[in-house]
Amino acid sequence: MPDTDIQIELERIDAFAADADLDAEIERAIEMAVPIEGMAAPPLDAADAIVDPVRVRNILLEKLRKAALKSRENQTKVFLDLLTRVQQLCGHVTEKREQVAMMTRDWRMSRAEAHRLLRLQHLSDETKAFYTEACVTPEMIVALEKATVTVRQEAHLLISTGRVLHTTDLAQMRKRRDAADPAARRAMQSRKMRAQMVKAGVSQLGIFKSRLGRMVRLLAKAYEMDCDRHERRAEFLRSAAMASAGLLLSEFDALFTAELPGFRDWYDLAPEDCAGHLARVRFGLERVNQGDFLLTEFPYNDWGPINLTLVRALAWLADIDVAHLPTEWPGDADRENAPEEEWTGYHSPDEPRHLTSLEICSGAGGAAIGLHAAGFESVGLVEQNNLAARTLMTNPRLGPIFFESVLDKDFKPYAGHVDLFAGGVPCQPHSVLGRQEGENDERDLFGKAIDIIREIRPRAVMLENVLGFGQRQAHAYRAKIFADLFEAGYEAELFAISASEYGLAQARPRLILVAMRDGLMSRFKMPPVLTPEPVTLGEALGDLMAENGWPGAAAWAERANEHGPTIVGGSEKSGNQGFSSNLQLKDWEARHIDARRIVLEAPGPDVPDDDIPGLTLRMGARLQGFPTSWVFQGAVRDQRRQIANAFPPIMACAVGLAIREALTGERVNYHAELLQHRIECVGRVERSSLRAHERAKELDLPLGDGDAMEALEMISDLVVRDHGENKLEQLIDRSGIRLVRRYCRALARKRAEMDISELPAAVRDTLHILDEDAFQTLAQASDWAIRRFIDGKYHGIEGVPGAARPAPPEEA
């Protein structure tokens, strides 16, 4: 066909493709290709039979080309539009760490993508328009901006002429220019040499691991031999294993030239501590090379005297699953099929090393119960509320209790000893529209929590908060927190969790901030949903409603066939004294609950069947998942707040199990461990202060204020009984307590210069009779302890610590 005919045919194709009706007709024809083939059709000319399929195919290819170009154009526009949003963000948020935090957490970007866009924030509108018109891909835009000025200018010139460039073209331009520069040429040769060295090192490491694996299997096979052939086995091992270990030790030193830490022990080693594992491997090779793995210092067992911990240490570097070696340790399948033992609430000393936890804002112990059930041993529970601390004391001790403010406590002793730092940190009122003074206020406990994390360096962090923390008003504040955590070496994520998903008959949605260091966050997975179908109020509270003989309990349970709203601590300002806010009252009423008040007991036999009952404190504790035997201290309103403000134990246990799995690398059986029965067991254990302090004593950590509080509680009872509570409560107020604490912390010569005239005369007289031991005690005591101490001293109650009652010193 002549060229002019081809041109005419192409124009006909373009005109044909531009007709929307014909396009649709052709597409329908293609879709109906099979039925059409079977239909009778009039005969066509041979030329038409040849041209028609070709025309149809060409039209479709042209449509695909145009659609692809449109998609490419849209891809560039979307990328540059996102870049414009990043430039606007940088105008409102100045710190790069907060920009990255907001882009990764709120914009759902990867950290690499966020940094890539931030590197392009200098791009001008003119340059963006040029890239948009030329349909330059995002990858090419990034490569162009990373290139040198001369390479970029040359590339822009070629693109403006219609050339389509690729990143390989930029590399060729750079190489061509570098070839004329001796310094650049030497740098390129150096890079090639380093790459070859890395490749050779990887190959050598593979050979070393293969040889080490053969020795590990040799030791395991020898371990399986009969004990009657011990002498022959010992001779065989010394002649074979010792020679292999000597060669492997030389290869190890050649491969791992960096300085390794000293060997500590076989057991207490974190999975992510690669340097520690390598040090353990080298120590193991030295022992095998010296033949020490068969000495009598290793205890004998049913199989033989080989040190199996040494075998496990070597297997770590050889990438061998020790569960498949012929040793006394069962494999994973054996552990999974083993019968589940009834858990009693105690952590057995025969179990593997338990993870430690430190909790602030502990409240009535909801999170502490759950974390204990998840396998964590507490080394400290910090709570400044008097009655909540007494609740922690009254029930089984889950760890040392510290009755003081988070702002006043010294956390330095815990550095390096805490696996999990946890707390229900309140988010104080502050401005979230920018970095304003409210965020730097000392009452902002989130900021204090970050300071504690920097100081003690826990392996993991769990902070619980309300859903409001994830709303749009908190964008800048969240970005600051995530940026602070990242600077401290922690990757952090926010996860939503609901009480109704774990067997509790209330919604209670919460946000959980989980953070981990050393790359462990990639192993963290939120726990599975325990109860896809929520438990109803009738199912949860039916037995408690019927315990006093109410005849309408069964009918009420059928009507209350939904889970309840989130219980709250009530509001004194609104006059609402129940487990509800005013906004929730209608929701509770729809579920046949009168939530305006707390009732003292369940309905009795004389209550009408159609009555709308209220909730007792025990019912509120049931909705929160507290153990049945858990006792709360204080008046009704105080107990209500402790119950409603708690993090439900089963939810804390769920998150704790997920964190434990990430920290240890050991799979968690949620069906066996995430049970309300385990929560109940924690409430029933007889755990004294001595038992609760065991782990803290092992680590040489503070043992808390629990014992001192018990003594002061006894003194308080004596004071109230002998002299009347009202009179003693008015002896010293909160501001006076703070002045007393400063007075006790001062040196003796400074006390004489301090002005304490604002204190009542009775308090000044009491301070004048104290000895140095009493001053040291009061300097670290809580507000409540100081009040009781001063009261007891002033009224001469026997048994109060401190000096006897001398006459006050004469005034100068």
Image: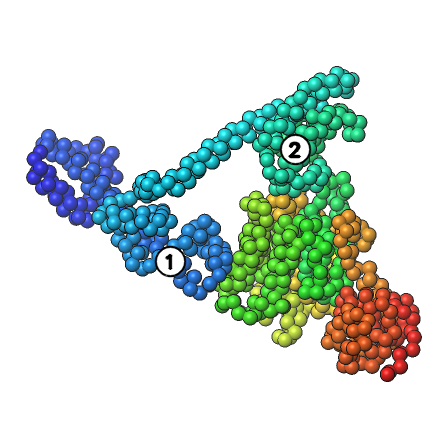
- The percent coordinates of residue 284 (x first, y second) are 68, 31
Q: Residue shown at 81%/63% (left/top)?
A: 709
- Which element is circle 1 on? loop
Q: Residues within 10 Å of mark 1 (few under 14, many from 20)?
A: few
Query: Pointer 2: residues within 10 angstroms few (<14), some, or many (20+)?
Result: many
Q: Position of residue 646 (x, y in %)?
A: 66, 60
Q: Percent position (x, y) of residue 213?
A: 61, 26
Tell me if residue 797 comes above or below residue 699 in the rendering.
below
Instruction: Identify residue for label 1.
Output: 122
Is 254 or 780 nearer to us in this picture?
254
| Residue at numbered disc 2 | 281
Q: Which quarter of the figure has residue 163?
A: top left
The residue under the point 77% across, 63% down is 390
**Position of residue 638 in the picture relative to residue 85 (left or right):** right
Camera-side residue of 760 and 574: 760
The C terminus sits in image quarter:
bottom right
How many numbered dots are placed on residues in this image?
Answer: 2
Relative horizontal placement of residue 149, taking residue 410 as reference (left or right): left
Please tell me whether residue 233 is drawn above or below residue 272 in the rendered image: above
- Residue located at (91% from left, 74% from top): 805
Would residue 200 be seen by someone viewing this image from the given angle? yes
